[in-house]
Image (cartoon, helix red, strand yellow):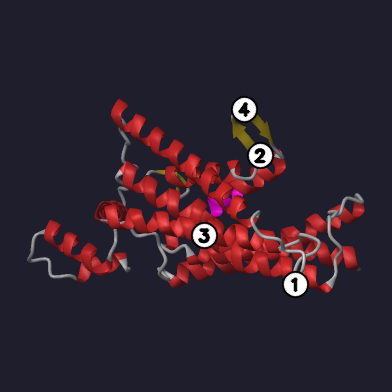
Amino acid sequence: MNVYLYENWNLNRTRYDIIREFCLCEKVDEEYFRSIIKRNICRDRGDIKMEKVKFGRKEVLLSGAVILLLLILQKVLGIAGSAFADMFSFEKIDPYKAFAWNFVHHITMLILTLFVILILNKLFKLNFGFELGDRKTGTKFVAIYTAIIAGVTLVVHILMVVNNSLPVYTFPLNKGNIIGTLCFQLLLSGPAEEVLYRALPITTLVKVFGKNIEVKWGITLESIIASFLFAIAHIKWSLFPFAIEADYTQFLYAFAQGIISGKAYQDSRSVIYPMLMHSISNVLMVGTGYLFLLL
């Protein structure tokens, strides 16, 4: 969907009719589109000022309830994926339990997430960004992110070698395990996690807020919240009994990756590019670790 195509439509009709017709044609959320148009008009006039977001008690409670529901939903879908994967024995194809369980877990989680998205789309006509969106912006994000993460990965592993702290795996680095784990990272880690932890919460929160709420540098409140939920998914926690077991380095890394992926998602209007970024970063990180251990 091209936002600026709006400017070329016949303006003899009322503005609201044009926007409504355009949104129906492009299958995008009307409130979300209006917020983009308003921001672009202000920017073009050179007087852009962030609209003050006013939340009453009702709006705050609704937003809080939705965020809590998203957190619970993500936890439940993860547990459902684990329960389904536990039903199978992978001894023949994966005797060292290196990748097969993860494949089934993430496939299950992705299918369930898509089912939830289908329901939300039926109810609220939301666009979760499964199209290519802005290809130029998305491709730029993927290229720059890949270059940066490749450099960071190399530096991190050199430091690991210097400090004798390379990762230790519970499985031998044979051909089957290497191919299996890298295929999982490439084909499923990005798609399953970006749909559940990026497209679903960000799009839902935009609907709840009624618009994008920019905080700083083009980063939105909904993206920050989604990133926090994504980081929480990388720690072990339970309510009954209440317990938290966290690796804070991993927590912060997941949050930072969430912010970058969230901006890529919203700027490109597509979840495809965050999927690629996520999968590529995981393949580079895991693959580089294998390479250094085998040298």
Front-lying residue, 128 or 91:
91
The percent position of residue 197, horizontal first and vertical second, equals: 51, 51
The residue that disc 4 covers is 242
Q: Position of residue 171 (x, y in %)?
A: 84, 60
Q: Which residues, given as a range, are shown in magenta? A: 256-260
Q: What residue is drawn where x is 70% and y is 38%?
A: 248
Q: Do labels 2 and 3 touch, CB within 8 Å? A: no
Residue type pointed to by label 1? Ile
Among the two numbered marks 1 and 3 on one chain, the one whose residue lies closer to the N terminus: 3
Dot 3 falls on a residue whose secondary structure is: helix
Mark 2: amino acid: Lys
Residue beneath the point at 47% across and 55% down: 113
Judge the density around disc 3: few (<14), some (14-19), many (≥20) Cα neighbours within 10 Å: many
Quick one: label 2 or label 3, which is nearer the N terminus? 3
Element class at badge 1: helix
Label 2 belongs to which residue? 236
Q: CA distance from mark 1 to mark 4?
A: 38 Å
Task: Identify which residue, 118 or 256, lies in the foreground.
Answer: 118
